[in-house]
Amino acid sequence: MTEAPEKPMTEAPEIGKEYLQPKEEQNIADMIATILQHLKKTYPPGQSLRQFHPKMHGFLTADVKVDPNLPANMRHGFLQPGQTYNAWIRFSNANTRVSDDHKADLRGMAIKILDVPGQMLEPDEQMPHAQDILLVSYPTLMSPDVASFKKNIRAICGGFGSMLWFALNPVNWPALIRTLQSMKKTKNLFSLQYFSVSPSRLGTPDQAVKYSAIPVSQPTIVEQPPKSPDYLRDNMQQELDLRPFIFHFLVQFQEDAVTMPIENPCVEWKSKWHKVAEITIPVQLFNTAERNQAGEQASFSPWHSLPEHRPLGGISRARRKIYAAISAFRLQNNQNL
């Protein structure tokens, strides 16, 4: 099932509506070509990692329980009152290369909710009834539109010279500032709030929302081993050796199409957050070779989604094709041993 966005915007935007951006399809095709060329140069056969969020801290089992008293306007898709799902959660660093956890970085929390009834927009080949929710530890993106996203991708994939040229251009300084603001040091991944950044549909065309996961349990492991480059994984394992950990899963409604735009994910929405579910990460031993392999083989995309939760906006439309191309390349390259 597909839903075409509106024509290019010529009037004031409306709640819940998408608007095509100039040269969008060509810009997306260019980004895919740039990324795949970069991956082919970077990773030999059998060793491909993700272009985005390649360093995995842990691939965790979890339960997602929907609020039993959910209001009627929120009862769409997987958000059915009292329903409980099994899930996988992948925590990661956003740096395009695996790096030391002591460095400031954006952190990721990718949730895969399992056995969700219904036909997905883009089924996960390994888990075809999985609903994915991709979150990061900052409420906005660095790129306001597809054209800017393309410039950022070219700079990232082009090496030091391309990054230097990008950084010297004042036009790109807002993106650089947003990137630096999003990169923070942390002692414990369970201490952070995570955001979807880009909006999604919630059931009906006049409802658009953003997602968030906020910790409810208080982390107990806060001291980082001074010499370990992987202390975030170590601390998370120590936490889950002791007790379960709980996040609240929230939605935030678009209330104004101008001040809370769909086509510009650099703008943070200011509407109220509503709790719709609870995520429980049980006590578990996740830092094993078998679990780590499963996490590396797992594929995540915001388009692994029911139509009721359709991703919205130009960046989301770009991610649909980019993520599919990256995943296909990675899985194929890792099989060519």
Image (cartoon, rainbow, N blue to C red):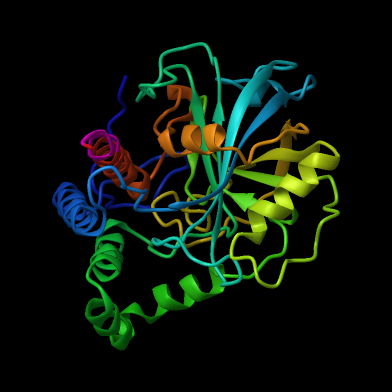
Give whichever of 323, 236 is nearer the camera.
Answer: 236
- Residue 75 percent across, percent down from the top left: 64, 20
Q: Residue furthest top?
A: 117
Q: Residue at x 41, y 14 (%)?
A: 119
- Residue 213 percent across, percent down from the top left: 67, 44
Give whichever of 16, 131 is nearer the camera.
Answer: 131
Residue 232 vs 279, above or below: the answer is: below
Q: Residue at x 37, y 48 (%)?
A: 50
Residue 289 vs 204, above or below: the answer is: below
- Residue 189 percent across, percent down from the top left: 68, 54
Task: Say whether residue 181 is visible.
Answer: yes
In the shown orientation, is residue 279 left or right of residue 138? right
Q: Is residue 332 magenta?
A: yes
**Image quarter for residue 329?**
top left
In the shown orientation, is residue 29 left or right of residue 189? left
Q: Is residue 86 magenta?
A: no
Task: Say whether residue 193 is visible.
Answer: no
**Image quarter for residue 317?**
top left
In the image, the segment drawn in magenta is 331-336
In the shown orientation, is residue 316 left or right of residue 229? left
